[in-house]
């Protein structure tokens, strides 16, 4: 009994140390963002600001505001479309299986392992041909297509736990393919939509490679604009740190308000799948 208590205490100590190591960069980030430029030195980065200076936040917000809108115009539609198409794919591949459906699903999952860098040039050429290069709609299309494999996987595992008797009863009542999906499947998959929504929104909001290569300055999302805050002559660390906090707020708020549903949805999918 005493040995178990000692092991538990050691485990808690290890977790506390790991938590401190994780929180130290966040502390430096927050403390620096509230400092004036004259207070920011390497030997004083651990110190709290002598007074709260919001000039870094004001400068960062003024520079990043248009890019925040670009990120919202990108992340929200791409997340909704990814969730909708992933749900339909998961519904078909789990409940309306056909010959070769498992092979099609395996090929779709293979798309998750294709490195982004390997397809950049043909992707740019394709977007140019369909006149969507250097545009938010083009970036939305890219993220929807690249998000389909993981979204389909999550929904397919989730729908695998839905009893077939529910669908059979709906079919007997004369409900068609989309009717079953709309009235029976979709209401049961709210947690699945939350999981996919959080996953996709976070990935799309934080994505950098596609954003920096497929858009120009006017269409760039906030993560690309954040990198541009570094400047060329002098680095305003308070502005950069404030910009990083502002850029991280949307995903942080999503996790705060929907985090419990995210964990619940993952557990439900793992148990049912």
Image: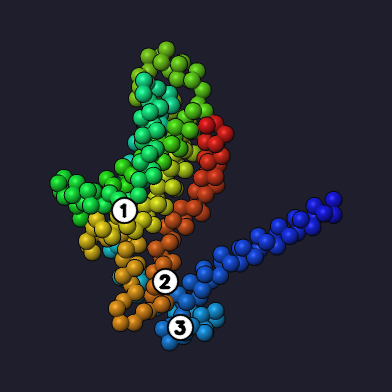
Q: Nearer the viewer, mark 2 or mark 3?
A: 3
Q: Residues within 10 Å of mark 1 (few under 14, many from 20)?
A: few
| Separation (CA) of disc 1 from disc 3 | 37 Å
Front in this rendered view, residue 233 or 125: 125
Ranked by sequence position, the earlier of labels 1 and 2 is 1
Ranked by sequence position, the earlier of labels 1 and 3 is 3
Residue 141 in which image quadrant:
top left
Front in this rendered view, residue 142 or 172: 142
| Separation (CA) of disc 2 from disc 3 | 13 Å
- The label shown at residue 40 is 3
Query: What secondary structure is marked by label 1?
Result: helix
- Residue 63, compared with residue 263, is above or below; it is below
Q: Nearer the viewer, mark 1 or mark 3?
A: 1
Q: Percent from the top left, x then y, of residue 65? A: 31, 65
Q: Percent from the top left, x then y, of residue 51? A: 50, 83
User: In the rendered picture of this protein, how many numbered marks are placed on residues?
Assistant: 3
- The label shown at residue 235 is none
Query: Label 2 belongs to which residue?
Result: 242
Q: Residue at x 40, y 47 (%)?
A: 200
Q: Residue at x 32, y 57 (%)?
A: 209
| Separation (CA) of disc 1 from disc 2 | 30 Å
- Residue 53, compared with residue 141, is above or below; it is below
Q: Percent from the top left, x then y, of residue 258? A: 50, 48
Residue 237 appears in the figure: yes
Q: Percent from the top left, x then y, of residue 93? A: 40, 27
């Amino acid at each position: 009994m005493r040995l178990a208590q000692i092991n538990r205490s050691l485990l808690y100590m290890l977790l506390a140390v790991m938590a401190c190591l994780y929180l130290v960069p966040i502390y430096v980030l927050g403390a620096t963002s509230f400092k004036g430029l004259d207070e920011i030195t390497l030997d004083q980065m651990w110190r709290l600001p002598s007074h709260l200076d919001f000039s870094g936040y004001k400068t960062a917000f003024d520079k990043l505001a248009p890019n925040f809108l670009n990120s919202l115009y990108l992340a929200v539609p791409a997340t909704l479309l990814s969730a909708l198409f992933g749900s339909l794919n998961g519904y078909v591949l789990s409940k309306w299986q056909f010959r070769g459906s498992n092979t099609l699903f395996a090929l779709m999952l293979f798309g998750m392992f294709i490195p982004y860098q390997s397809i950049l040039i043909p992707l740019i050429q394709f977007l140019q041909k369909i006149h969507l290069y250097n545009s938010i709609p083009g970036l939305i299309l890219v993220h929807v297509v690249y998000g389909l494999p993981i979204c389909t996987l999550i929904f397919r595992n989730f729908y695998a736990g839905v009893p077939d008797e529910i669908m059979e009863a709906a079919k007997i009542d004369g409900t068609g393919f989309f009717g079953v999906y709309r009235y029976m499947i979709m209401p049961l998959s709210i947690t699945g939509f939350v999981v996919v929504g959080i996953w996709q929104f976070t990935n799309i909001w934080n994505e950098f490679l596609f954003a920096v290569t497929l858009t120009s300055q006017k269409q760039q999302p906030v993560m690309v604009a954040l990198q541009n805050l570094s400047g060329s002559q002098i680095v305003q660390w308070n502005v950069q740190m404030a910009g990083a906090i502002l850029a991280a707020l949307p995903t942080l708020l999503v996790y705060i308000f929907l985090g419990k549903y995210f964990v619940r949805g993952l557990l439900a999918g793992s148990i049912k799948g």
